Image (tube, helix red, strand yellow):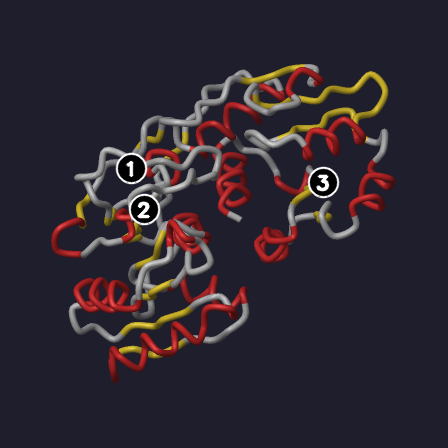
Amino acid sequence: MGDLILLCVAAEELGIDKSDFRWVIETRSAPWARHLGLDHVCYDEALLGTHWRAAGRYPLVINTEQRFGLSQATALAARAGGGRVVSFDTNVAAAWSDEVVRYDPFEAHESVEFGRLLAAALRLQKPVVIRARRRRAPPTDRPVVGLGGLQSDSRRLSEETWFEITSRWSGGRPIYITAAPLDRPFARRLADRLGASAELFEGDFDAVCELVRRSSDVLTIDSGFLHIASYYGVPVTSIFTSSREKKWASLSPGSSLIRRDDLACQPCALYAQVPKCRYDFACTRVDFVSHCRSYELPDGCQDG
């Protein structure tokens, strides 16, 4: 979902109307597409049917996948005669593209890279500038903790770690705790431990987005919650373990990072893949007091 949210950020910064596109996405990104009203299909829901309906229809196909080749098969199938497929040069099937755009998998923020891809594909003669995401309305509600990462070995923080970080971060303020349906039992236990100051929020995706949009600030791990808050300009305190904060950090002014700085192996994730860990995921053993710090906007992004 984070890719789709940051792609929307890049399109908005370039002045591109998102309704001009037909979006072919993964099912896991569909809640965000529905939330913004994007015209979309999910290629992994009905693979053959999606390819058949798209075959040969589009004069321009932009493949935003950074590495893996299935999306390139979809892009090539959708290209009309005489049309163009534009992709990143790191896609394993980039040789079959009509044009490629350089992709930096290490340093550049993902929104910047998506902006460069869109600008090249649409032949826009303008610099790609990703600005800080400022709030469009003042906050009207309490802070939000967005639990995530529990299905991933490299981002699965213990209940004790979540409790310690949340307690320190909230400082006794009343907070909401929310999570995907699969993680709500964990969220309920955490809320119970935090006591009367914490309220479990169990609304649907649109309700969670609205809750985040009007919240004062958000605590979460590197996840879709981070990018939802960043999209709406809400300050985020984000926990980073194996992933690359330079590529995925919040674009909201006033945001902070919680990340260990004593591990030579961190970050290790590349193209969202985490290699086998020899250190028992030491990066997940973090705390608020030792590892929280403010940070400047990522490289390639501007304040204002």
Q: Is residue 64 shown above or below 88?
A: below
Label 2 amino acid? Thr
- Nearer to us: label 3 or label 2: 2
Left or right: residue 236 compared with residue 172:
right
- Disc 3 to disc 2, C-alpha distance: 34 Å
Out of 63 and 160, give the one closest to the viewer.
Answer: 160
Is disc 1 placed on a helix, strand or loop? loop
* Residue 158 location (% of width, % of height): 31, 63
Residue where numbered disc 2 is placed: 241
- Disc 1 to disc 2, C-alpha distance: 7 Å
| Residue 193: numbered disc | none
The residue that appears at 79% across and 26% down in the rendered structure is 79
Q: Residues within 10 Å of mark 1 (few under 14, many from 20)?
A: some
Left or right: residue 187 compared with residue 258:
right
The residue that appears at 55% across and 22% down in the rendered structure is 90
Is disc 2 placed on a helix, strand or loop? loop
| Residue 266: numbered disc | 1
Figure quadrant of residue 81 = top right
Out of 278 and 168, give the one closest to the viewer.
Answer: 278
Q: Is residue 81 shown above or below 19?
A: above
Figure quadrant of residue 184 = bottom left
Left or right: residue 270 compared with residue 99:
left
Label 3 amino acid? Arg
* Residue 151 location (% of width, % of height): 46, 58
Whether the residues at callouts 1 and 2 have beta carbons within 8 Å, the answer is yes
Residue furthest out toward the left: 289
Is disc 3 placed on a helix, strand or loop? loop
* Residue 286 location (% of width, % of height): 22, 53
The residue that appears at 28% across and 64% down in the rendered structure is 162
* Residue 122 location (% of width, % of height): 63, 22
- Of marks 1 and 3, which one's residue comes earlier in the chain? 3
Residue where numbered disc 3 is placed: 22
